[in-house]
Image (tube, grey):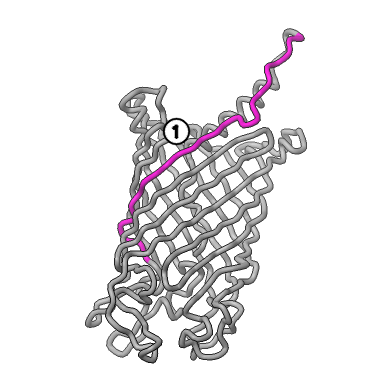
Amino acid sequence: MSFRFKAIAAAALSLATLATGGLAQAADLPVKAAKKAPDLPFFLVIDDRVSFSYIFNAAQPGMFTNTNGVVNAKTTKQVYSFTHFDLWAYGTNFFTISMFKSDHNDPAGPCTAPGVIVSPAAGFAASPASCAGATEIYGLFRSTLGWNELFNTKAFTQGPLQNISFEVGMDANTENRYFGAAKRDVVAGLQFAFNLPYKGYFNVAPLMYYEFANHNSFSQCGAGFSAPCLIDGNTSFKPTWAIETNYYMDLGFMPPNMQYWSISGRAAWYGKKGTDTEPLPASVANGVYPTKVEFNSEPIRLTLDASKAVWGDKYSHMVDVWVAYRYWQNKFGLDHNNAFACTTVVSGRTVSNGSCTESSLYSGITVKF
């Protein structure tokens, strides 16, 4: 499954911006005495959080029901997440790991579709079956090294531009769906960090994206897939481009007694990476199609700093309650109009089944510890 920059610790990054700015200002102050400065800790900011969230109308490619021409490709997902953010002298590190638990419309193996299991003993005929909802574990890591810090300069702070950084990272997942995805990818490139009003920021990162390993049980030799097929179901995609963005801003223009709110969001684009079962060639007969540009976003998240509202500034962002909107098109690079997993037949016509486009309300609670 494709990356998704979905739970970045917005408040922590806001603190990181403040900490970096504070150090720069301190460097400009005149030295009044030859007194030894106290040693700074290695990590200037450490922020760890756990979250529980709920996706009301998630989608999973290939998972849908078609009952008398009525197509239902929606599933709910419970999400349990841990996130870590730290700031040190030369950059930042961000790590998140999440468990996604689906309902029965996105079943675990051995079901190949909701309410259906394929039996090789019956010549790959579909038989009724009830399987539990799938569970997926997804991890993501991003690390930056700031040019201002590396080269001991302020040349990369100009106007709203706060810094330019090298950025590297990777993603990995595992799941218990019949599909058996086991994604591994790496990213590398630059990040441009800009300041926004009210302690806010906007980051944009042009990257190289390389999904060098994944898995697809449906394309595996012996699974009913006609030749050519994947010997062990393992796929390896071509390197491509990516653009990842995220932002955060306090709603500081509100009256002082209502300054508990902030907005944040993210958007990411991933380029075409070969066919949807790369390295297999495109083949309409086999249901293999070229991938499309993937768009994965959470354009708006509204957060209430509940702990600050109840207990005061001292407890700011200890407990956040939030609601967001998610939009994900061409999920995992699959062509939502043509790919085999994304279409079905209704009244003799092949139409999109909606499982490769996710548009959903998303809400949760985050606790800092």
Few, some or many residues within 10 Å of mark 1 (<14, 14–19, 20+): few
Question: Which quarter shows the C terminus?
Answer: top left
> Height in image: 101 above or below 159?
below
| Residue 44 located left or right of residue 72 | right
Q: Residue tagged by mark 1?
A: 369
* Magenta stretch encompasses residue 363: no
Q: Position of residue 353 (x, y in %)?
A: 35, 76
* Magenta stretch encompasses residue 37: yes
Which residue is at a point 41% across and 32% down the rendered structure image? Answer: 317
Which residue is at a point 37% across and 29% down the rendered structure image? Answer: 259
> Height in image: 248 above or below 73?
above
**Magenta segment range?**
34-59
Q: Where is residue 211 in the image (x, y as percent from the top left)?
A: 60, 65
Pick the front one: 280 or 345? 280
> Height in image: 134 above or below 313?
below
Pick the front one: 90 or 212? 212
Which residue is at a point 61% across and 79% down the rendered structure image? Answer: 279
Give the amino acid type for the residue marked by disc 1 in the picture: Phe
> Height in image: 34 above or below 53?
above
| Residue 176 located left or right of residue 360 | right
Question: Magenta residues: mostly which secondary structure?
Answer: strand
